Amino acid sequence: MPWRNLPPEMQHTLAGFVWAIWWALIGRSLYHANLVRQGRRRFWSLILAWELMIAIGMGVVAGGAAEWLQLTGMAAAGFIAAISYLGPRTIEAFQVWAERKAGIDDPEP
């Protein structure tokens, strides 16, 4: 296997990336299944392609945040899945709320 020839640090990073993407896919799949159950989305549709891209992006971001928070094992997996389930819109809404609460104004464009 080609990855076995990589330095240990790179193997560790690659393994972390793969696990982050895996748990992000689980989180986004739960979100998608919930919308299907509510009748707001068909199970098989082109939207699944967008969900895949969101899952990859959220996996990278949440994986980095989990590492920064020094979460390991199942704590990191749960964190990544939960953040991925919430998705970018919920994270952005929380950020706006936190900025308003802290008194940080949005700069004029």
Image (cartoon, rainbow, N blue to C red):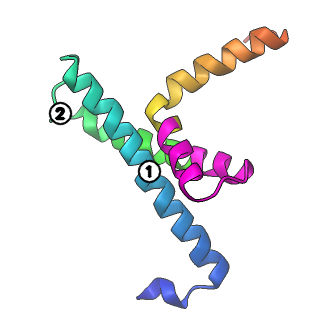
Question: Pointer 2: residues within 10 angstroms few (<14), some, or many (20+)?
Answer: few
The percent coordinates of residue 98 (x first, y second) are 73, 17
Q: CA distance from mark 2 to mark 1?
A: 22 Å
Q: Nearer the viewer, mark 2 or mark 1?
A: 1
Seen at 51% across and 42% down, the residue is 58
User: Which residue is depicted at the point 48% across and 30% down?
Assistant: 87
Pick the quarter of the image with the N terminus. bottom left
Number of marks in the rendered image: 2
Does residue 16 appear in this view?
Answer: yes
Q: Which mark is residue 107?
A: none
Is label 1 in a helix, a strand or a loop?
helix
* Circles 2, 1 touching at the beta carbon (< 8 Å): no
> Which is nearer the eye, 15 or 2?
15
Quarter of the view holding residue 29:
top left
Q: Quadrant of the C terminus?
A: top right
The boundaries of the magenta stretch are 61-82
